[in-house]
Image (cartoon, rainbow, N blue to C red):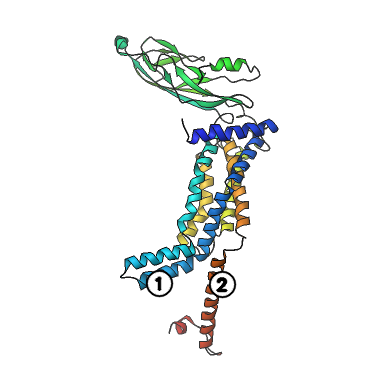
C-alpha cells in the first residue's frame, strides 16, 4: 500500500474537498476551505519555525560574538570548545531547529499541491508506451496486460474513482495487430459504465500519439492498429469537470498560463502571480529578512526572491486553481508572521538582549566622555 503523496491526496485531501463541496457546491470555495484547513492544521509547525527564525535573527550578533570568544579561548582544546558550543546552542537555540517543522509539513503540502493539479481541476493525462514488432516475431511475444498507475477521476460533482488505462493484451504488438486502450477502475469496472450512471456528466477521453505517429493509427474510442515496427508513446486525456469553471475573478480554475500563443493575456492569472509576489515581499518585511542588519549578499537574494518566483510562474505556468491555493496560503502565512512577530520574546532571550543594549549604551557613553566638549569627533581622531 502506498503511504506517500498519493495516499495523503486520496485519503485526506479529497475527502476534505468533497466535504466542503457538499456544503457549498463551489469548487473555488472548496479550494479556499481546503487550503485554510491544511494551514490551520500546520499552524503549530509553522509557528515553531517562525519563532525560531525570529529568535535566531535577534540573537545572531551576540551568538556570533560568543562563538568567536569560545573559539579563541579554547583554540587548542577542541573537546572543550565543542562542549562550550553545545552549551551555547542550548542557551540560544539551535539554528537548524527551524528546519524540522518545514520538513515535517512538506509531504502534506506536496499532497495538497498534487490534489489541486489533478481531477476535477485539471485534465488528467495517462502515458502508454508501445513496442511494435515485425509480424515474423509474433511467437516471441507473450501477452501480458499492461496497466498504468491509477489516478482519481471525478465522474460527477463530488463523485470520483481511481481509474487506470489498460491494454488487455499488453503493450507489445506486431504489425497488423489491432487492440484497444480502455479506462477502468481498479475494481475492473469500465469508465463508460460509470459514466452511464451520471448522464449529466460530459467526460470524453481523448487519445493522441506523442511519439511514433507513423507506427500506429488510433481512433477516438481508443482502438489502435499497428502499422510498422518501432516505439510509440500514446497520451490519453480525461478532462477535469471543474477545469473550465470560474470562481470570483478567475475565468477557469484549470487554465494553465497567463498568455496564449495568439498573444491573449489572461489578466486573472497575471493578477494572482503579481499578488503572490507582493505577499511574499510583505512576508519578508514582517519577518525581518530585509532588515539593514542582514548580510549584503543575503539582502540581495531576499529582494529578488519575490521577482524570481513570480517570473517562474510566468514561464513555468501552473493551473489557476493551484495559483489560487498558493496565493491564499501565502496570505495566511503573512498574517501568521505578523501575529507571531509581535509575541514577547522568551525570558532568557529578552534578558540577553537588554544586557547587550545596556553594554552598547555604556560603551557609547564612555566614548563620549573621552572627548572634550569642543573637540570634533572625526574618524581619524577616534581611531587614534
Q: In terms of sequence position, does the residue under pointer 2 or pointer 1 come before the other? A: 1
Q: Are marks 2 and 1 in contact (CB under 8 Å)?
A: no
Percent x, y for residue 262?
Answer: 56, 32
Percent x, y for residue 109?
Answer: 53, 41
Q: Secondary structure at mark 2?
A: helix
Q: Give the residue at x 60% y 32%.
A: 15
Q: Secondary structure at mark 1?
A: helix
Percent x, y for residue 66?
Answer: 43, 70
Q: Nearer the viewer, residue 106 or 26?
A: 106
Percent x, y for residue 231?
Answer: 36, 21
Q: Give the residue at x 57% y 50%.
A: 44
Q: Residue 262: which numbered mark, if any?
A: none
Quarter of the picture containing the C terminus is bottom left
- Residue 149 against residue 228 in the figure, above or below: below
Q: Give the residue at x 61% y 35%.
A: 16
Give the CA separation, mark 2 to mark 1: 20 Å
The image quarter containing residue 339 is bottom right
- Residue occupied by mark 2: 354
- Residue 312 against residue 282 in the figure, above or below: above
Q: Nearer the viewer, residue 162 or 368?
A: 162
Q: Is residue 263 left or right of residue 166?
A: right
- Residue occupied by mark 1: 69
- Crowdedness near tag 1: few (<14), some (14–19) or many (≥20) residues, C-alpha within 10 Å: few
Q: Nearer the viewer, residue 89 or 213?
A: 89
Residue 255 in view (yes/no): no
- Residue 377 against residue 321 in the figure, above or below: below
Residue 282 in view (yes/no): yes
Q: Residue furthest right?
A: 24
- Crowdedness near tag 2: few (<14), some (14–19) or many (≥20) residues, C-alpha within 10 Å: few
Amino acid at each position: 500500500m502506498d503511504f506517500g503523496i498519493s495516499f495523503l491526496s486520496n485519503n485526506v485531501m479529497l475527502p476534505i474537498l468533497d466535504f466542503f463541496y457538499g456544503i457549498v457546491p463551489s469548487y473555488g470555495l472548496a479550494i479556499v476551505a481546503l487550503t485554510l484547513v491544511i494551514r490551520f492544521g500546520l499552524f503549530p509547525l509553522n509557528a515553531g519555525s517562525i519563532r525560531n527564525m525570529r529568535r535566531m535573527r535577534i540573537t545572531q550578533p551576540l551568538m556570533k560574538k560568543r562563538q568567536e570568544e569560545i573559539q579563541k579561548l579554547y583554540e587548542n582544546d577542541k573537546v572543550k570548545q565543542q562542549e562550550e558550543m553545545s552549551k551555547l546552542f542550548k542557551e540560544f537555540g539551535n539554528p537548524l531547529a527551524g528546519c524540522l517543522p518545514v520538513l515535517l509539513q512538506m509531504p502534506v503540502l506536496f499532497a495538497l499541491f498534487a490534489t489541486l493539479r489533478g481531477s476535477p481541476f485539471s485534465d488528467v493525462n495517462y502515458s502508454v508506451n508501445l513496442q511494435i514488432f515485425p509480424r515474423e516475431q509474433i511467437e516471441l511475444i507473450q501477452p501480458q496486460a499492461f496497466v498504468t498507475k491509477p489516478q482519481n477521476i471525478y465522474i460527477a460533482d463530488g463523485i470520483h474513482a481511481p481509474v487506470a488505462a489498460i491494454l488487455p493484451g499488453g503493450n507489445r504488438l506486431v504489425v497488423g495487430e489491432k487492440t484497444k486502450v480502455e479506462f477502468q477502475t481498479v475494481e475492473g469496472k469500465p469508465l463508460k459504465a460509470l459514466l452511464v450512471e451520471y448522464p449529466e456528466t460530459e467526460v470524453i477521453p481523448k487519445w493522441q500519439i506523442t511519439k511514433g505517429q507513423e507506427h500506429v493509427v488510433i481512433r477516438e474510442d481508443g482502438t489502435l492498429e499497428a502499422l510498422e515496427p518501432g516505439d510509440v508513446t500514446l497520451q490519453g486525456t480525461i478532462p477535469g469537470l471543474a477545469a473550465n469553471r470560474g470562481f470570483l475573478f478567475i475565468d477557469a480554475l484549470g487554465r494553465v498560463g497567463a498568455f496564449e500563443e495568439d498573444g491573449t493575456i489572461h489578466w486573472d492569472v497575471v493578477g494572482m502571480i503579481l499578488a503572490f509576489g507582493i505577499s511574499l515581499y510583505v512576508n519578508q518585511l514582517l519577518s525581518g529578512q530585509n532588515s539593514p542588519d542582514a548580510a549584503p549578499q543575503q539582502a540581495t537574494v531576499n529582494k529578488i526572491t519575490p521577482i524570481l518566483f513570480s517570473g517562474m510562474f510566468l514561464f513555468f505556468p501552473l493551473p489557476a486553481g493551484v495559483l489560487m491555493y498558493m496565493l491564499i496560503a501565502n496570505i495566511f502565512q503573512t498574517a501568521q508572521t505578523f501575529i507571531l512577530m509581535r509575541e514577547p520574546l522568551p525570558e532568557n532571550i529578552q534578558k540577553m538582549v537588554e544586557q547587550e543594549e545596556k553594554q552598547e549604551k555604556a560603551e557609547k557613553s564612555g566614548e563620549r566622555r573621552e572627548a572634550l566638549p569642543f573637540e570634533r569627533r572625526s574618524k581619524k581622531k577616534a581611531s587614534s
